[in-house]
């Protein structure tokens, strides 16, 4: 009976034969389990029908494809979820330089290795050369490159005379391009320029380390002006906070996303009141826990100190999540040369997030944050066929989130894991 129901549903969906996609564009994907959404029961022995880049139907039963629907053998047999979003990436690696004209064969391997290799069908670029990133985005959308949807914030805004010490080795001509607005109008002008260049939001560095313990801070009225201009244009405001005071300044400026937890001494940290303000004002958090171990290891910080500091960041995430805050997955990959996000999943779980909360941070939460809940973030008929097929079930081991068999965007397989990997 279930097989008959499936065939009838497929026939109904494609009853107008003149509108039915070509057979190669319509296929059946099967899996041992399907996570429809983080807040819905999973389906075992599941199937998904993809047609014209959209999800046509899905369900749970042993089925055979009706005429005209091929079985997608290569990507079948795993655990299926909605496509993942990495909400904190950078395309600053030299491998992406000159993206306007660089040959496809030189761009495709690093693009796949940083994004679709790990299931990311959407990424948020939180600060790179805007011209270069826009070229990547356009080449992906034209089909010249196989990659994720790219959302970008354009050129980040820094405090006046406040470029962080870790960026000072950039070429002088590049440093000169980094906006450091001295007035509200200058800040608004940068936001307008970014938006005209395709940016869907703004990133503010409200506090930047200068070395020797000095922190340079963006004037509150400048941060607020940039946030207001961004919101008037329908964009999101993302903030690099550096410390708890920076997080508080971000909340007061009316931002949407804090893109890091912070590394603090035991005497500081995020107070219950601060966490409550973040949640009350619907500020989302990208934890980037993996980044801290990476940075502290580079600085040769002893392992016990490193673990203590990362543990403090974990507690921030735990408090925020427990208070009902919206968590968005992100790693700062691109700045961080460790491409594999496995450790981020492990640290998020260690902070107390369940596998389904982590799945939400990858799928439904970013879709909601970016006002895309009507087309992505869950496996549902009519939604974009952005799918990830995993080799194992992340509910039993969160490391499985990084064990990707196939990454599919709008029905097209962008990454297929070789059997020898």
Image (cartoon, rainbow, N blue to C red):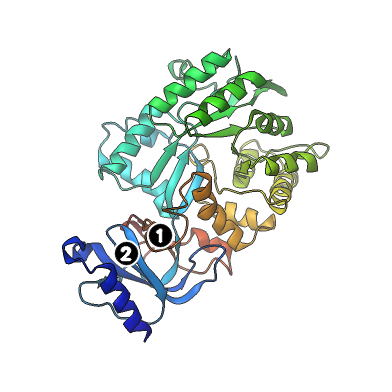
User: Residue 127 or 11: which is nearer the viewer?
Assistant: 11
User: Left or right of 72: which side holds 268?
Assistant: right
Residue 385 shows in the view: yes
Q: Nearer the viewer, mark 2 or mark 1?
A: 2
Q: Secondary structure at mark 2?
A: strand
Q: Residue 410 appears at what percent x and percent y?
A: 33, 55
User: Left or right of 399: which side holds 54?
Assistant: left
Q: Quadrant of residue 226?
A: top right
Q: Residue 100 appears at what percent x and percent y?
A: 29, 31
Which residue is at 67% across, 33% downward?
Answer: 251
Q: Residue 11 appears at what percent x and percent y?
A: 26, 73
Residue 103 vertical position relative to residue 163 in the rendered view, above or below: below
User: Residue 277 or 265: which is nearer the viewer?
Assistant: 277
Q: Secondary structure at mark 1?
A: strand
Quarter of the picture holding the C terminus: bottom left
Cα separation between marks 2 and 1:
10 Å
Residue 175 vertical position relative to residue 60 in the rendered view, above or below: above
Q: Residue furthest left?
A: 18
Look at mark 2 in the image and give the residue it sits on.
50
Q: Are marks 2 and 1 in contact (CB under 8 Å)?
A: yes
Residue 387: which disc? 1
Which residue is at 55% across, 21% downward?
Answer: 168
User: Residue 421 or 156: which is nearer the viewer?
Assistant: 156
Rate crowding at label 2 as few (under 14), some (14 to 19) or many (20 or more) other CA atoms within 10 Å.
many
Quarter of the picture holding the N terminus: bottom left
């Amino acid at each position: 009976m279930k097989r008959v129901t499936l065939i009838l549903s497929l026939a109904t969906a494609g009853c107008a034969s003149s509108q039915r996609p070509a057979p190669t564009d319509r296929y059946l994907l099967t899996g041992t389990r399907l996570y429809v959404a983080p807040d819905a029961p999973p389906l075992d022995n599941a199937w998904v029908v993809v047609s014209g880049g959209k999800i046509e139907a899905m369900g749970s039963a042993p089925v055979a494809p009706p005429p005209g629907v091929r079985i997608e053998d290569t990507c079948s047999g795993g655990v299926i979820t909605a496509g993942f979003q990495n909400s904190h990436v950078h395309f600053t690696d030299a491998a992406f330089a000159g993206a306007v004209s660089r040959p496809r064969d030189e761009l495709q391997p690093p693009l796949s290795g940083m994004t679709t290799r790990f299931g990311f069908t959407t990424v948020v670029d939180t600060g790179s050369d805007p011209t270069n990133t826009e070229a990547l985005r356009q080449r992906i959308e034209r089909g010249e490159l196989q990659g994720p949807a790219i959302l970008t914030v354009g050129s980040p805004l820094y405090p006046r005379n406040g470029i962080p010490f870790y960026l000072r080795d950039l070429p002088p001509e590049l440093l000169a391009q980094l906006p450091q607005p001295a007035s509200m109008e200058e800040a608004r002008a940068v936001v307008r320029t970014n938006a005209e260049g395709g940016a869907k939001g703004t990133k503010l560095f409200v506090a930047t380390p200068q070395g020797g313990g000095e922190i340079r801070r963006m004037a509150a009225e400048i941060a607020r002006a940039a946030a207001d201009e961004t919101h008037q244009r329908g964009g999101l405001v993302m903030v690099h906070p550096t410390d708890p005071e920076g997080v508080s300044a971000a909340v007061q400026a009316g931002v949407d996303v804090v893109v890091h937890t912070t590394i603090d001494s035991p005497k500081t940290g995020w107070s219950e009141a601060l966490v409550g303000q973040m949640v009350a004002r619907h500020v989302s958090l990208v934890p980037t826990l993996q980044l801290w171990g990476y940075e502290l290891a580079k600085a040769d910080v002893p392992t016990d100190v490193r673990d203590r500091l990362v543990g403090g960041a974990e507690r921030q995430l735990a408090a925020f999540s427990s208070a009902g805050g919206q968590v968005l997955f992100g790693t700062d990959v691109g700045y961080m040369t460790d491409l594999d996000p496995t450790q981020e999943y492990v640290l998020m779980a260690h902070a107390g997030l369940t596998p389904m909360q982590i799945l939400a941070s990858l799928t439904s939460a970013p879709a909601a944050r970016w006002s895309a809940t009507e087309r992505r973030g869950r496996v549902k008929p009519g939604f974009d066929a952005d799918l990830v097929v995993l080799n194992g079930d992340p509910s039993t081991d969160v490391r499985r989130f990084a064990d990707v068999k196939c990454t599919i965007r709008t029905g097209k397989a962008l990454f297929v894991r070789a059997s020898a990997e």
